[in-house]
Amino acid sequence: MLFLFSMDERIDIVTLNGEPTGDSCMKSFAHEHGLLHASVHIWFYTKSGDILIQKRSKNKDIYPNLWDISVAGHIASKETAIHSAVREIKEEIGLSIAKESLSYKGIWTEKHSHANGMVDHEVHHIYITELSLSLESLIPQKEEVSELKLISIHQLEKSINQKKEFVPHDPNYYMYIINLLREQISYEK
């Protein structure tokens, strides 16, 4: 089965630790064959305790119109995770950010098999950072993001437990992120 992606790109195949193996392929090929590859997940929070989330475009191949991570994307071949994070933030929400403002929180591996036969097997490199600008100053990338909003950590936890409007990441992943965000926000208060 051939998967058509509006933005197919060359990506590296990685180990379970997120390190490139030396092999690369097109993203569509990795998804067709369930090859382990890397992505970045960037979670933005405010000092008041809100979390930035994005609604995926209705045109996305998987999980259209569902709420998701503040910013996420695949790491291009030969690109580092931190450079990918900075690039994805600029592309998806129009925000230029210094790599030093991103706090690296490790990796999480997930594998999802989709009804269309696609297998998304990823090592997510996780970053958190403060959103110091207003929501209105962000510019969502139309092809990727249909809406941005801020919600409280409590609202995030309640919403993902209902599993209706959010991308169905592993519940343990969401709890890991919620705990990271709670710790960071309470540390800054």
Image (cartoon, helix red, strand yellow):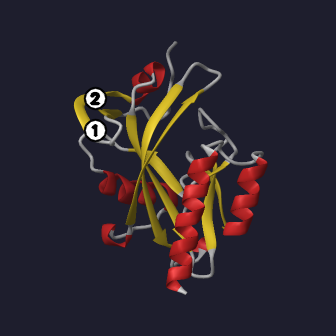
Q: Residue furthest top?
A: 1
* Above-or-below relation of 128 to 92: below
Q: Residue furthest left?
A: 22
Quadrant of the image occupied by residue 62: top right
Indicate the position of residue 27 as horizontal and vertical percent values.
40, 30
Quadrant of the image occupied by residue 151: bottom right
Evaluate whether residue 178 shows in this view: yes
Residue in the image at 50% along x and 84% along y: 188
**Looking at the image, which is closer to me, 107 or 3?**
107
Quadrant of the image occupied by residue 85: bottom left
Indicate the position of residue 148 as horizontal and vertical percent values.
64, 61
Residue in the image at 51% along x and 79% along y: 132
Crowding near pointer 1: few (<14 within 10 Å), some, many (20+)? many
Badge 2 vs badge 1, beta-carbon distance below 8 Å = yes
Q: Secondary structure at mark 1?
A: loop
- What residue does disc 1 label? 77
The disc placed on residue 24 is 2
If you read the primary sequence from the N terminus, does the residue marked by circle 2 or circle 1 appear first? 2
Indicate the position of residue 175 as horizontal and vertical percent values.
61, 56
